[in-house]
C-alpha cells in the first residue's frame, strides 16, 4: 500500500512538473507603442495580439505596452534592433535617423490619398522599404499602421488659407522636411518631443500641432485647441517592426504566425482608420472644435514641391528614392 501511494505521489509530481514546464515554455512577445491603447496603434496592436494568440492556440502570448510604457519610440526602436524588445510600433519620423530613406514618406504632398498610402506600403514599395530596413536598420516590417492625414490644430484662429497660418507657432516632430515645409508656408514651426506637446499647448508655449483626427481626439487636444484645418500634406504611417535576428531565431511555424498576424493587423488597421476617423472628427466638433477646409491647398502643394522637395533629396538618401516612389505611385 505504501509503495502504491509512493508511486502515485511520484507520478503526480512528474505530471505537475511537466505541466509547469509546458506553462513556462509559453513564448511571450512584448509589443511597445507610443500612443494609447484606443489609438490607431492600439487597434493595430490589439488585432496583432488576437491573431498571434489565436493562430498559435495560445502557445504564444502577446503583451501590449501602450502610451510609451517601454520608453520613447526612438528608445523602443533601438531595443528592437538589439533584440531586447521583440516588437514595436514606430512613426516613420523616428525611423529616419536610423534609415534616412524613410524620411521620403514624410515628403509634403507626395502621398495625397488613401490609395497612395496603400500603394506606398504594399507591393513593390512595401518590399522596397522592408529590404532597406533589414540592410540599414537591422529590423523588418511586419505591417503598417495607417493613421490618415496630419491635420493642423491651433488655439488662436481658424486657418483656412496660407495667410491664416502666418506666424503661428506649430509644434512639429524632429523632422527637417516638415520643419522646412511649415517655414516655407509662413508658420513658425517648433520641433518638440511628443511627450511635451500637450503641456506646451496647455501653457500656450506653442499655438498648435498637427496630427490625424483619431490621435487628436484620443490625446484630448480638443481641451486645448479650438480649430482644426484639414490639410493633406502628409499621411501618417507607423510600421510595426521586429528585429532581424529576433525573427530569424524563431522556428518556421512561429515566424509564419508572426508574419501572417502582421498582415492581418494591417488590413484591420486600415479599416479601423477609415471608420473611426469620421467618428473622432464628429466627437471633436461636438466638443466645440471648428473645422476648416483649405481654400488654397494647390498653393501649399506648389510651395512644398518647388521650395522644399529639391532641398532634401540628399536627406532622404538621394533623388532616386523620391523618383522610385513617384514611379510606383503612378505619378
Image (cartoon, grey):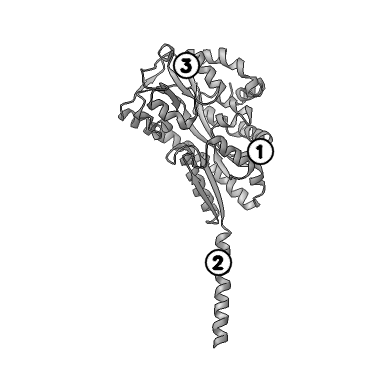
Q: How many marks?
A: 3
Q: Residue furthest right?
A: 135
Numbered disc in front, either 1 or 3: 3
Q: Kindly state the secondary structure of the residue where label 1 is placed.
A: loop
> Residue at label 2?
19
| Quadrant location of the N terminus in the rendered image | bottom right
The answer to whether 57 is drawn above or below residue 151 in the figure is below
Splitting the image into 4 quarters, where does residue 121 fall?
top right
Q: At which x and y percent is residue 218?
A: 40, 35
Task: Name the residue: 40% across, 33% down.
Answer: 219
217 or 294, nearer to the observer:
217
Q: Quadrant of the C terminus?
A: top right
Placement of 287 over or under 253, stated as above or below: above
Q: Which mark is residue 188?
A: 3
Q: Position of residue 106 (x, y in %)?
A: 55, 25
- Residue that carries the numbered disc 1 in the rendered image: 138
Q: Label 2 to label 3, Cα distance in Å?
A: 62 Å
Residue found farthest to the top: 163
Position of residue 87 in the picture relative to residue 210 (left or right): right
Q: Is residue 208 above or below residue 81?
A: above
In primary-sequence order, the first of circles 1 and 3 is: 1
| Other residues around mark 3 within 10 Å, as few (<14) / some (14–19) / many (≥20) | many
Extreme residue in the bottom direction: 1
Between residue 160 and residue 190, name the one nearer to us: 190
Amino acid at each position: 500500500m505504501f509503495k502504491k501511494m509512493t508511486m502515485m505521489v511520484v507520478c503526480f509530481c512528474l505530471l505537475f512538473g511537466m505541466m509547469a514546464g509546458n506553462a513556462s515554455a509559453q513564448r511571450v512577445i512584448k509589443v511597445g507603442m507610443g500612443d494609447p491603447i484606443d489609438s490607431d496603434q492600439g487597434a493595430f496592436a490589439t488585432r496583432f495580439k488576437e491573431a498571434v494568440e489565436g493562430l498559435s492556440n495560445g502557445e504564444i502570448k502577446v503583451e501590449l505596452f501602450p502610451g510609451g510604457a517601454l520608453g520613447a519610440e526612438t528608445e523602443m526602436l533601438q531595443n528592437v534592433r538589439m533584440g531586447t524588445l521583440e516588437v514595436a510600433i514606430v512613426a516613420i519620423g523616428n525611423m529616419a535617423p536610423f534609415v534616412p530613406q524613410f524620411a521620403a514618406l514624410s515628403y509634403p504632398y507626395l502621398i495625397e490619398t488613401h490609395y497612395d498610402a496603400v500603394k506606398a506600403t504594399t507591393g513593390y514599395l512595401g518590399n522596397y522599404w522592408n529590404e532597406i530596413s533589414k540592410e540599414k536598420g537591422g529590423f523588418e516590417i511586419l505591417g503598417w499602421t495607417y493613421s490618415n492625414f496630419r491635420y493642423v490644430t491651433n488655439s488662436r484662429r481658424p486657418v483656412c488659407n496660407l495667410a491664416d497660418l502666418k506666424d503661428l507657432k506649430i509644434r512639429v516632430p524632429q523632422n527637417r522636411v516638415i520643419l522646412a515645409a511649415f517655414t516655407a508656408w509662413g508658420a513658425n514651426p517648433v520641433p518638440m518631443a511628443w511627450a511635451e506637446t500637450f503641456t506646451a499647448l496647455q501653457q500656450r508655449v506653442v499655438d498648435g500641432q498637427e496630427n490625424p483626427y483619431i490621435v487628436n481626439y484620443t490625446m484630448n487636444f480638443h481641451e486645448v485647441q479650438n480649430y482644426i484645418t484639414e490639410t493633406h500634406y502628409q499621411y501618417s504611417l507607423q510600421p510595426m517592426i521586429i528585429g532581424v535576428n529576433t525573427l530569424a531565431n524563431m522556428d518556421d511555424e512561429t515566424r509564419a504566425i508572426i508574419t501572417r498576424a502582421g498582415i492581418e493587423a494591417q488590413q484591420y488597421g486600415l479599416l479601423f482608420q477609415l471608420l473611426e476617423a469620421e467618428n473622432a472628427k464628429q466627437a471633436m466638433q461636438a466638443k466645440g472644435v471648428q473645422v476648416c477646409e483649405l481654400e488654397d491647398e494647390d498653393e501649399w502643394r506648389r510651395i512644398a514641391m518647388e521650395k522644399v522637395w529639391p532641398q532634401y533629396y540628399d536627406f532622404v538618401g538621394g533623388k532616386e528614392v523620391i523618383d522610385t516612389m513617384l514611379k510606383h505611385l503612378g505619378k
